[in-house]
Image (cartoon, rainbow, N blue to C red):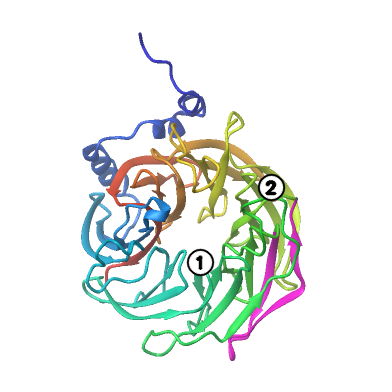
Amino acid sequence: MTPLPSRRTVLLASAGSPLALAATAPTATAAATYASTSSGARRRSAVQYAYVGSRTTKQRNARGAGITVWRVASGQGTWDLLQTVPADDGDPTTPTPPGAIPVNPSFLVLNPEGTRLYAVHGDATNVSAFAVDPSQGTLTLIDTVDVGRGNPVHLTLDPTGNWLVVAFLAVPGCVVTLPVRADGSLGTAAGVLELPGTPGPHKTAQLGPNPHHVVFDPTGRWLAIPDRGLDRVFVAALDPTTGALALNDPGWVQTRELEGPRHIAFHPHRPLAYVVNELRSTVHTYGWNAGAGTLTPLQTLASAEPSMTGDTRAAEIAVSPGGLHVFASNRSGAGDSTPGGPDPDTIGVFAIERHGGLKPVGWVSTQGIRPRFFGLEPSGQRLFAANEVTDTIVGYDLDADGRHLRPLGILAKIGSPTSLVWRAAH
């Protein structure tokens, strides 16, 4: 008997042929051939370096080894492993690799010059700094600092490059600024922002302040901080002289109960911002007043496809380089404690309408489970998703209008990948 197609396969097949292509992964050879033939009309760096963070602890059921460094030949679509920076697995009964950094180097950021890389260590209290070899792209540890706050989950550099801003998720979550010294090393905390509010009603995911993301708006003046635990998106300002953080007035916008704001993406040239909410799997559209530093709610819609009836948690959000579309990832299951699946998870594609709100275009398979992260390469012409549970990086070409994600297949096998940053070869 021929097996029946899954719900998600049927949905993808009905969404239009460019999206439906993502329901089946091409072979590695097909992916490489497609990458070669599709890149001729658009400029890309011939070689780039990809830095992938991962989870490493048995507590997280992780299989990651640490931070991996890859040489990526865009024209051929090939990924070659150059280096693994080993990380501890958190298990006292197993030997620690020589020179290991702390557990779960889960989220990464590069400075604009591509000479320094910084990593937070999820479930720990540490942040690490690395020097980047200018010719080989490999990493050398500069230092690791213990901030004394629990579970750092995201980090960003301020426009001056003098301050690293880190979100700590463990209750009571907070945002901390660390000075960046001339040699790239990190100093002790210069500013700590405690976030006010009443926890949401979720019995396990909203026990107090849970800032999950820190990102500067396009002007570099304001810092946006989605907080999963308080159902608020905060707006703060950084003093570039002292590193102190202060909430704006008003300092936040309130969401509906149980939304669980997770990540935010600003429009590249319109006064708009988009927030993906983890607990309800929704996307909020906000008007953004860069002069006043305020967010105004405009629209809420589901991040997952309408036929999704099971548990789902949204994760990542991005705006296409041309500012015409928004992408949002959806993870099956009810959080990290569940396996997710069995069908592959998805990335939703939404068109930005004239008034700034969103209209669903379709949902593309990630060919794996739990896309905790996805992001665009620097050219803005490809998108890469990290499937944390099924240990894969998958790629997509973007059409010129950013509407269609054309699959390149599985490009790399990496244990428990959680973030990805890019550096062009020099």
Q: Residue at x 36, y 11 (%)?
A: 2
Q: Is residue 383 in view from this perspective?
A: no
Q: Which residue lies furthest to the right in this view?
A: 250
User: Vertically, is 335 above or below 296?
Assistant: above
Q: Is residue 415 magenta?
A: no
Q: Is residue 94 above or below residue 187?
A: above
Residue found at the far front of this picture:
93
Give the percent coordinates (x, y) of residue 285: 68, 52
Tell me: 286 left or right of 370: right
Q: Residue 163 placed where, x, y %?
A: 51, 82
Identified by mark 2, the residue type is: Gly
User: Of the residues shown, which amino acid type is indicated by label 1?
Assistant: Asn
Marking on residue 94 = none
Instruction: Say which residue appears at 39% left-offset and 40% top-offset.
Output: 368
Does label 2 or label 1 sit earlier along the sequence? 1
Q: Give the camera-side residue of 181 and 198.
A: 198
Name the image quarter holding residue 199: bottom right
Q: Is residue 243 left or right of residue 48?
A: right
Q: What stretch is highlighted in magenta?
A: 232-256
Residue for badge 1: 151
Query: Residue 357: which disc?
Result: 2
Residue at 52% from the left image edge and 70% from the top image edge: 150
Q: Main secondary structure of the magenta part?
A: strand
CA separation in Å, label 2 and label 1: 34 Å
